[in-house]
């Protein structure tokens, strides 16, 4: 039987700096390759191929070693876009679960067919809703809607906002989340300041928060914490 392989950018143990599990120790398995090109991407090096190829057995062994060394019980499948490698994930997941590790998928929320192949294997899913004016890309409203339709119960949403975000588009993002589940955790993430992006000003950020809170019951403004902590 042929074993799956995938391009892996890096595997390391650290603390999660975003979303619902912020502060928790995790092993990060970062895949290479992405189907998007967001201007605010914080891991642009992982968008490109090649990286080194790993089999599922090799990846599982390294993840388990890092988890034991770092006392982590959660694996973050991140990227890049991990769902580009869903066949690899489908083969990898049982190996990690056998080692007692929970699976946390971080995804841009556009590959709904691929999510359907692995959703039942995930402990949690961190889904982006892409606000086009923030990331400098075309809209993905239809793909996000279909993604939410097949997303597992333990899914939460992140919307990155830059100084260029349009409030009209943000309202659409909130509407998608509310239509799927008004109680879904929704994180507004001001972009980390860097060469290609700046966070929104305080006033539009407060307005965005008010819009989200009017339709969703679990809303939090949470910038990336790991740059503030000085860790990867």
Image (cartoon, grey):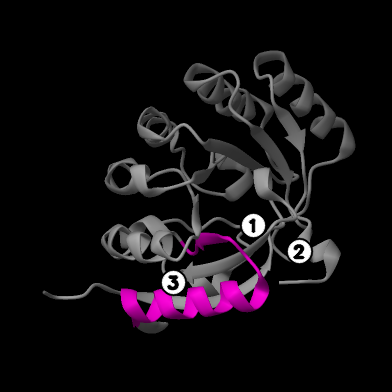
Q: Is residue 137 above or below residue 203?
A: below
Of label 3 and label 1, which has the lower sequence position? 3
Question: Does residue 63 show up magenta in the picture?
Answer: yes
Question: Does residue 15 show up magenta in the picture?
Answer: no
Separation of disc 2 and disc 1 at Cα?
8 Å
Mark carried by residue 40: 1
Using the image as rendered, state which of residue 166 and residue 142 is in the foreground: 142
Q: Quadrant of residue 51?
A: bottom left
Q: Secondary structure at mark 1?
A: loop
Question: Is 144 on the left-hand or right-hand side of 43?
Answer: left
Residue drawn at (73%, 20%), measured in percent from left and top?
Answer: 213
Residue receiving disc 3: 32
Return the x and y of residue 91 as percentages of the image width and height.
28, 63
Residue at the outermost bottom position:
52
Picture quarter with the C terminus: bottom right
Q: Quadrant of residue 165?
A: top right
The answer to whether residue 148 of the structure is visible from this angle is yes
Q: Is residue 218 above or below residue 111?
A: above
Question: Which residues lie in the magenta part?
Answer: 54-80
Picture quarter with the N terminus: bottom left
Residue drawn at (77%, 71%), measured in percent from left and top?
Answer: 231
Using the image as rendered, state which of residue 62 and residue 157 is in the foreground: 62
Of label 3 and label 2, which has the lower sequence position? 3
Separation of disc 3 and disc 1 at Cα?
17 Å
Q: Are marks 3 and 2 in contact (CB under 8 Å)?
A: no
Return the x and y of residue 53 as percentages of the image width and height.
35, 82
Between marks 3 and 1 in the image, the one whose residue lies nearer the viewer: 3
Q: Secondary structure at mark 2?
A: loop
Return the x and y of residue 6 as percentages of the image width and height.
33, 74
Residue drawn at (27%, 47%), measured in percent from left and top?
Answer: 117
Separation of disc 3 and disc 2 at Cα?
22 Å
Residue receiving disc 2: 194
């Amino acid at each position: 039987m042929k074993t799956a392989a995938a391009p892996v950018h890096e595997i390391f143990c650290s603390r999660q700096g975003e979303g619902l599990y912020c502060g928790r120790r995790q092993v990060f398995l970062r895949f290479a390759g992405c189907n998007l090109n967001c201007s605010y991407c914080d891991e642009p090096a992982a968008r490109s191929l090649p990286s080194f190829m790993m089999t599922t057995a090799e990846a599982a062994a390294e993840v388990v070693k890092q988890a034991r060394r770092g006392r982590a019980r959660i694996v973050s499948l991140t990227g890049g876009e991990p769902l580009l490698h869903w066949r690899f994930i489908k083969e990898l997941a049982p190996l990690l679960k056998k080692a007692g590790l929970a699976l946390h998928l971080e995804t841009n929320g556009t590959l709904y067919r691929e999510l359907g192949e692995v959703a039942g294997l995930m402990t949690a899913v961190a889904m982006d809703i892409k606000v086009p004016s923030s990331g400098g890309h075309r809209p993905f409203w239809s793909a996000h809607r279909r993604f939410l339709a097949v997303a597992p119960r333990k899914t939460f949403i992140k919307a990155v906002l830059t100084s260029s975000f349009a409030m009209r588009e943000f309202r659409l993002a909130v509407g998608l989340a509310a239509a799927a589940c008004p109680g879904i955790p929704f994180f507004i993430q001001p972009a980390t300041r860097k060469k290609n992006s700046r966070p929104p000003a305080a006033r539009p950020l407060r307005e965005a928060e008010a819009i989200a809170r009017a339709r969703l019951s679990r809303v939090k403004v949470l910038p990336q914490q790991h740059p503030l902590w000085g860790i990867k």
